[in-house]
Image (cartoon, helix red, strand yellow):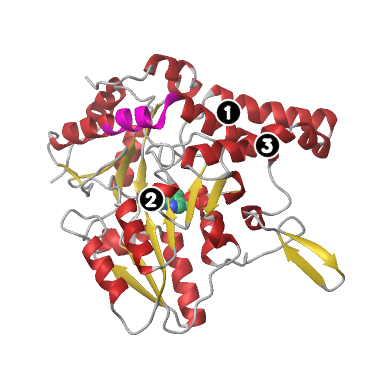
Amino acid sequence: MTVSTLDVERARRETPGTRNVAHLNNAGAALPPTCVTSAVIDHLQREAAIGGYEAAAEAHDRVENTYRAIARLIGCQTDEVAVIENATRAWDMAFYGLRFSPGDRILTARAEYSSNVVAFLQVARRTGAVIEIVDDDESGQVSIDDLRRRLDTGDHPVKLVAITHVPTQGGLVNPAREIGVATREAGVPYLLDACQSVGQLPIDVTDIDCDFLSATGRKYLRGPRGTGFLYVRRAMIDQLEPPFLDLHAARWTAPDAYEIRPDARRFENWETNYAAKIGLGIAVDYALSWGIDAIEERVTALAERLRNMLRDVDGVTVHDQGQRQCGIVTFTLDGVASQDVQQRLAEQGINVSVSLVEYARLDLSHRKLPDLVRASVHYYNTDDELDRLIHALPEPRR
Ligand SMILES: Cc1ncc(COP(=O)(O)O)c(C=O)c1O
């Protein structure tokens, strides 16, 4: 039995989707609680009833609450938060706001998210910046020794360290805080992709000492799709020029002049999905009401139980790395394509996903792995659902 202090029955009562599916695709998009869905629908109904602008004005405090909730969640100030439509665009607004010159070095790691790597490649092609992959240590997490060595040496300056905290394709948790210590000592900006960690692990940006952090709403936070946010350390806000500006991000002060906003909302744009933005704040408050420590404890215990059960199944290999692991569990089944495993489980009401090699070329290709089955647990999952997954697996083929 998984030990937990969390009231799982209440969590499931408040999550209608748990009655329909064993949802083990929380790293894709988690099931939202009723309070999130209701907040979104209520606002859409107000828009329909009184007008979109009028509903936004009426909901002003609920919209502002989203910034306050995010600030509480990650330990920052509200003026350091921008609410953006997803984690990728949030990350982009920081990354494309930096200026790179020929030879400038960008340090990243094997587990980096695919869209981030594509952005590095684009900027490298455009500017002559150079991408360097920091080695993994023997456990598979970013090697702090290799990071420090690269920060201390090289003919050109390191302009950015960009790391994914929890990769999409495995249970690894990268040592975000140790990276923060090293980057601070070197005086290099640090961009942390916390898309898969926010909501399942405690995150404190002061403790991690990152300059920028991006996250999404729909995964471990259980918020609506199409929501995300960016944290920018106050001292860095002025130093980043948003790649796009509009009349929300900047003020048009004279026919030939504009002034960029002084806070992190310079990375937002004017039109936004207010219903989803309100829903994100409700999701963050809901997560905080359970306690992120309690969520981590249960998620980690469920994932570890699942890994142990999978290791006992004939033909299954578990592929998660790292000294510290989280709620994402990846595995393969001998002779059966991961897509077929996913399909078989789906037929029995069990949602998992597949992590494609194409989306993790620095990692899965390097480890010579094929596409992986990804089962990602949340605190509302049960031991019974994990047992169902194990029993629903197809036979291995030799
Ligand atoms: C590690 C990581 N970063 C970024 C993203 C992108 O998030 P979004 O789809 O909200 O842009 C994902 C999505 O799976 C992810 O796993």
Per the image, is 113 magenta?
A: no
- Give residue 36's mark: 1
Q: Position of residue 228 (x, y in %)?
A: 55, 46
Left or right position of 83 against 248: left
On the image, the x and y values in percent for residue 351 come to 38, 34
Dot 1 alpha-carbon crowd within 10 angstroms: few under 14, some 14 to 19, many 20 or more: many
Q: Considering depth in this image, is 213 or 317 the residue closer to the camera?
A: 213
Residue 144, above or below 166: below
Say if residue 286 shows up in the picture. yes
Q: How far is disc 2 from disc 3 in space, using C-alphas?
A: 27 Å
Q: Residue at x 41, y 25 (%)?
A: 21
- Residue type pointed to by label 1: Val
Residue at image coords 49%, 74%: 123
Name the residue beneath numbered marker 3: 63
**37 vs 190: above or below:** above
Q: Which mark is residue 58?
A: none
| Residue 208, numbered label | 2
Question: Disc 2 marks which amino acid?
Answer: Ile
Q: Are marks 2 and 1 in contact (CB under 8 Å)?
A: no
| Principal secondary structure, stretch drawn in magenta | helix
Image check: 183 left or right of 216?
left
What amino acid type is highlighted by mark number 3? Val
Res. 252 image quadrant: bottom right
Mark 3 or mark 1, which is nearer the start of the sequence? 1
Q: Position of residue 4 (x, y in %)?
A: 29, 21
Per the image, label 2 sits on a secondary structure element best described as helix
| Mark 2 and mark 3 residues within 8 Å of each other at the beta carbon | no
| Mark 3 element type | helix
Say which of 97 and 304 sits in front: 97
What range is drawn magenta here? 290-300
Residue 123, placed above or below residue 45: below
